[in-house]
Image (tube, grey):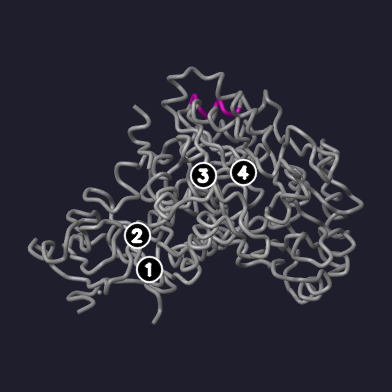
Amino acid sequence: MLDFTQHRARVLMNAPISCYNETILTSEVTSLKTAYIHAKLRHPHHDAFIVENGQFTVFGKTIHVLKHDYDTVVDLAHHHVLPGFHDSHLHVLGIGMIRGIFSAAGFARIDALIEAARNHPADPLIGRGYHESQFTPSRSLVRTDLDQISTEKPVIIYRVCGHMATANTVALQAAKQLGHPLPADPDSFDLESGIFKEEAIEWLTRIVPHPSHEQLTHELLDAQAYLLSLGVTAVGSDDFAIYKMPFEPVTDAIEALDAAGRLKIRLYEQANLPVLEDLQRFIAKGYPGKRFNRYRIGPLKLLADGSLGARSAYMSQPYQDRNTRGIRVFSPERLATLVQTAMAAGMDFAIHAIGDQMVEELCELAETFPEETRMRHRHSIIHAQLARRDQIDRMQRLNLGAQTQPIFINADLPVLPVALGERMRDSYLFGSMLRAGVLTTIGTDAPVESPSPFENLYVAMTRRSIRHPELGVFLHDEALTFDEAISAYTHLPAYLTYDEARLGRLKAGYRADFIVVKGLIPARPDSLLQTHVLQTYIDGECVYQRPE
C-alpha cells in the first residue's frame, strides 16, 4: 500500500458510555481511560487498545493492554473494529433533503411512479432518484409523464444523478413567469420534453422556496444520524448546491450545530461556488481554510461536466448512442479564473469531472501551475470514472487525486456498453489509479447512490453490480483488495483534508474514530452485504449504537 504521507516529500462496561440511537447527544469527549478488549483488528498481534482524551494511546494483546492504567473496560466480544469511514465526497444536506421529498427510486413502471406521486402532498412536488434502467421499457421521464401527476401544481423530478431534471407544464409556466431568460446553451434543455440538464436546471428551481434555518437544521441532523449508523465518521461534503440559494444560510446552520456540540461527524466542506462574485464574497468573509470544531472549510468544488447516464459528461468523442459529446459547464477561461482565485486564497480544488475530455482539460489546467505549487496543494478530480488509461500517469505526475465512487457501477453497468461501446474498457479504472500512485479515495456521492460503505466496498472488491448481478464482473483487474479498499475509505481521504497524521488509522496518537461491526468476513466480499455497524465512535465518544 502506498504511503501518501511519504509520497509527498464488550462485562460490556464497568462505567456507562453514552450512545444515541436516533438522537444526538452533546456530551463532551471523555477524559476516562477506556480499555477496549477482545477486538478483531487488522493486526496479527493486536486485539485490544486504550482510548484517552479522544485518541488512541495503546495497542496490543488484551493481556498486555490490561496491565496499563485504565478506568473502564469495554469487551468487544471478538467483533471486528475498523477505522471510521471517511466518505471523501457526498452531500450531507442532500441526504437530509432527499429523505424528505418524493422518492422516484424503485418503480419498475412509470405509471406506478405517477400513481404514487399523485398522492404526495408537497406543493411544489420535488422528487429525485429514478434511473431510466429501472423502467420497462427503459426511458427517461418527460413532461407529459409529470403532467399526469398534476396539472395544478409544479412537479420537478430529478434523475438519480441530479444532473438532469424533468418538469411538468405547470412548473415550466411558473418558471417562465419569473421572467428570467432561458438558459444560454440550447443543448442543456428542451421545453417540449421538459428535460433540463446541468446549469439549466437552475432556471427551473427558482420556483422552489428556500428552506428555513429550522428545515436546514433538521435535514443536516437527519442525514448525520443516518451516516453515523453506517459507520461514517468523516465526510467531504458539497452542501452549497443542494438548494439554489446563497451559501450563508447553509454555513450558518452547520456552524450553529457545531457550536452547540450537535455536529458529531467531521464535515469538510467542499465549497461549491461556480459564480466568481460568490467566491470572492466567500473569500472576503474569511472562509477559506477556516476551522470551527468539526466543521472545516475545504476546497473549491465545481461541477465541470455532467453525468454518464444523462449523456452530459464531457467526452473527447461522441457517445455511442447519441450525437453529442456532453456538456462542458465552464469555458476554459472561466474555469481557470475560478481556480486561480481560489488558489490565491489558499484553497485547493476538488472538481467534478466524469468525461475523459473534462479530465483532459483539468490536467491541462494543472500543467499551467508551477511544480512547487502543484505539490503544495492537494487538488483532486471528483469521480474521474471515464479517465483513460493514458491519463492516469499524467494525473499522478500532476499530483491530481481521484475521489472515486465504485458504487456507481451498481447503476451504470448496463449503461456503459450502450453509451460507450468498446470505450467502456477505459472506465472505472480505480485499481489502476491506486497502483499507479494516484491518491485514490472512495466515496458514494450520496444521495446519488446509497451512502452505505459496505455496498461500496462490495462493488470495489468484486466489480459486480448489486442491482444487476446478471451482468457479471466488470474489468476484474480493477478490483481492490479488502485492505486497499479500506485504506481508500479511511486514511487516504484524510490526506485530502490535511489530517493524515491524526485521522483514518487505528494507531496510537490518532483520534479515536472507529466502528464495531458484525457479520464481516474480510476474505469473503459477499459478507459485506450482511455486515452492519454495532457502534460508531468519534473522538472516543459513542455517537451511535445499534438498537437491540
* Quadrant in which the N terminus is drawn: top left
Q: Using the numbered discs, state the Cα–Cα distance from disc 4 to disc 2 in whole angstroms.
A: 27 Å
Q: Which residue is mark 2?
A: 82
Q: Using the numbered discs, state the Cα–Cα distance from disc 1 to disc 3 in whole angstroms.
A: 26 Å
- Amino acid type at mark 3: Gly
Q: Residue furthest bottom?
A: 548
Q: Which residue is mark 3?
A: 431
SS assignment at label 1: strand
Q: Position of residue 229 (x, y in %)?
A: 44, 67
Q: Using the numbered discs, state the Cα–Cα distance from disc 4 to disc 1 in whole angstroms.
A: 30 Å
Quarter of image, res 340: top right
The answer to which of marks 4 and 1 sits earlier in the sequence is: 4
The reply to whether dot 4 and dot 1 touch (C-beta < 8 Å) is no
Q: Which residue is mark 1?
A: 517
The answer to which of marks 2 and 3 sits earlier in the sequence is: 2
148 and 437: which is toward the camera: 437
Q: Position of residue 205 (x, y in %)?
A: 74, 52
Please indicate whether residue 107 sits to the left or right of residue 32 in the image.
right
- Amino acid type at mark 4: Gln
Mark on residue 322? none
Q: Using the numbered discs, state the Cα–Cα distance from disc 2 to disc 1 in whole angstroms.
A: 8 Å
Please indicate whether residue 57 sits to the left or right of residue 103 in the image.
left
Q: Position of residue 167 (x, y in %)?
A: 82, 57
- Amino acid type at mark 1: Val
Mark on residue 385? 4
The reply to whether dot 4 and dot 2 touch (C-beta < 8 Å) is no
Badge 3 crowding class, 10 Å Cα cut-off, few under 14, some 14 to 19, many 20 or more, is many
The answer to which of marks 1 and 3 sits earlier in the sequence is: 3
Badge 1 crowding class, 10 Å Cα cut-off, few under 14, some 14 to 19, many 20 or more, is many
Q: Position of residue 514 (x, y in %)?
A: 33, 59
Residue range corresponding to the magenta coloring: 338-344
